[in-house]
Image (spheres, grey):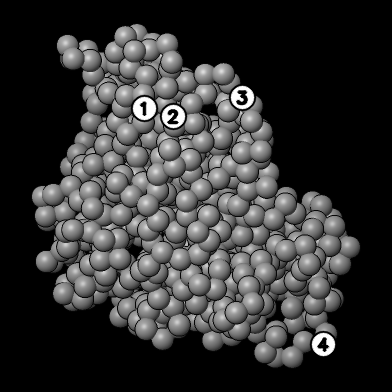
Amino acid sequence: MKPKKYIYNAALGIVAAASLTTVTGCSEDFLDPDPLSMFSPDNTYSTESGLQSTLAMCDRHLRLYYTHYDGGKCNISVPIMTEYLFSELGLYGKTDAGGGLWDDIAYKLSPTGGMQDGDSNRMQFYWDEGYNGIKYANSIINYIDGVDGLDEKTRNEYKGRAYFHRAFRYYILCWQWGDVPLVTKLLDVPKQNYSTTSRDQILRMCTEEVEKAVQWVPSQKDMEYYGMVNKEACRHLLAKLYLSIGEFKKAEAQCDTLINYSGLALMTEPFGDASAANSLEPQTWNVTRNVIWDLHRPENKMVPANTETIMGLPNCTEQSRIDFLLMRIFGPMWNDTRLTTPDGMQAVLNLARSDSRYDQTLDALRAFGRGIGTMRPTYFAQHALWNVNGVEDNDDYRHNSQVGNWVHMEDIKYNNPSSAYHGQNLRLYKEDGSILCTDTIRDWFDFPLYKIYLKDASAENIAGSTQFNGCTNGSNGNWYLFRLAETYLMRAEARLYQGNTAGATEDVNTIRNRAHCSQLYSTVNIGDIVNERARELFLEEFRKVELTRISYDLALSGVPDEWGNVYDVNTWDKQEGTDKNNGSYWYQRIVHYSLYNNVGEGISSGVATLKYTMDKCNVFWPIPNSAITANNKGQLWQNYGYDGYDPSIKKWEDWHEAVADEDRI
């Protein structure tokens, strides 16, 4: 089969900003977020190439949800990290930052503070980028009927893809913020009197539109390019939307179609480029080729042989690639001076290949990347998550250091030639019990190498480099948006909510069998399904989004969580406080499985004391004050628990009425 091209290939020629300006008459201002007014004064789309340009921008911007950087801080954090810091899987680890939001989220997060720091979080980015993407989608939907020369089939394909993009943005916004303004139109003059629309109504509108997209958008097998919205991606998003509005039977049916009738299948054997599968320095860290390692090599994510990919995000061509420094951001700071040998030396040195002390058998830099521990996985994510049937399943390929996918700190070796322990494995304690690392938050944690390893091509070409960070110039940083493994886990959820525990168990065990787990479930509860999502979809799923959605589904269905709690659909998101009682399912996982609200006056790293607090009301983020003040002729709803919350503020409970009101300036 002839390999398909990426949508960002230069041959396509539709993603340059110049084409947006030349073809459509758009100004550069059109590319800037203006999430309230959606004012678009001169954007007339008279040609198909104008539609293509905007649709390509929609496709390209999906990648920004993972890879976008804030100014010069691209080497410190990425947006997807924020989703994990608001979950039971991740904690802010950059202990030298001092005074930021993550010291005390419950008391510092507000509509006017803590929502945008390129170092630690991207809440404001998600708001701005969400509405920016909606603007692009609205441009296509609003103008396409005025473009001459399109037959009905082609016109519907464009509409369907635009519906997908609009629905995807609203799905993220609605589960990050809850009730938000509904914007579906481009107006002749700015609108500053929006009212908020209920989350449920927005998601029901999106469901109707994506139902059409499933009918109109072609399958990936019938498309020339990778990275564009396809029928399978629309169906996967439709299943998420059905779950979001409590249509569990319909969600299961969409998953059934994807799993059984779409030509997709889980990858179960090694595949793809063999050099990609074993690209590490084997004398330092050997990877035994396996399906999980191959599945997560960027070179393999969008190739015809990978039948598990539903939709990928290309990030490998120099025309559009964005640095994606996963090893730096999510790896431990193993070369910190606060991590020492038993004889008092720095434990691991950051040695370039040109350094006279370099030993290729102890090349931690190229094997694991030069981590700075901006986010560290929780103890739960490192250990307890992998307990099934009372056993920590180290046979699970996703947690297996023997095949090279998972790294324990003790697997790394001292490489300081001045130490008598040179070449021995790291240890956390001396024989007398004293600790050898004074900042275990940032410097000492286990990690899934198979997920964060992206070969740093530019550093590989420079013998003097000490910065192996991930996807840089010349590197491949392709990523998954959707893949079939998540479809199985969504179907497990839908089945569980309908009382089909046996079917849910079968779906979870299908994923575990593929990972070569030694432990399978005899029966599953919601905690088991959510745990399997964490094992399988780390840094792929929007973790906070999915936990919030699941919190609502538990309340809607009446299904108990793993502790026997049953949630009230009217109160699950209307509570505040930092005690361990009640709250949403999202909150219960936070306080059961992480340090949040569990460290009293704080935990010291040797550099700073971090409190790690989270409030029940943080299940939804505060509506940004910038959006509220910009909407100065109307009132937006503020979320429960934050300054400005007022239940008497008008909110649209019918999306048709909200759309009709958009013309009222």
Query: Going 54% across and 86% down the picture, which residue do you hit?
Result: 215
Amino acid type shown at disc 2: Leu
Asked if the residue under mark 1 is in contact with the one under mark 2, i.e. CB atoms within 8 Å, the reply is: yes
Residue under circle 3? 354
* Residue 362 marker: 2
Q: Distance between the Cα atoms at labels 1 and 3?
A: 20 Å
Which quadrant holds residue 265? bottom left
Residue under circle 1? 413
Amino acid type shown at disc 4: Gly
Residue 498, image x and y in percent? 22, 76
Q: Distance between the Cα atoms at labels 2 and 4?
A: 63 Å
Q: Distance between the Cα atoms at labels 3 and 2?
A: 14 Å
Q: Earlier in the sequence, mark 2 or mark 1?
A: 2
Q: Earlier in the sequence, mark 3 or mark 4?
A: 4
User: Is 388 displayed left or right of 29 in the figure?
Assistant: left
Q: Secondary structure at mark 4?
A: loop
Amino acid type shown at disc 3: Ser
Badge 2: residue crowd in 10 Å (few <14, some 14–19, many ≥20): many
Amino acid type shown at disc 1: Lys
In the image, is residue 399 above or below residue 566?
above
One can see residue 356 in this view: yes
Badge 3: residue crowd in 10 Å (few <14, some 14–19, many ≥20): few
Q: Earlier in the sequence, mark 1 or mark 4?
A: 4
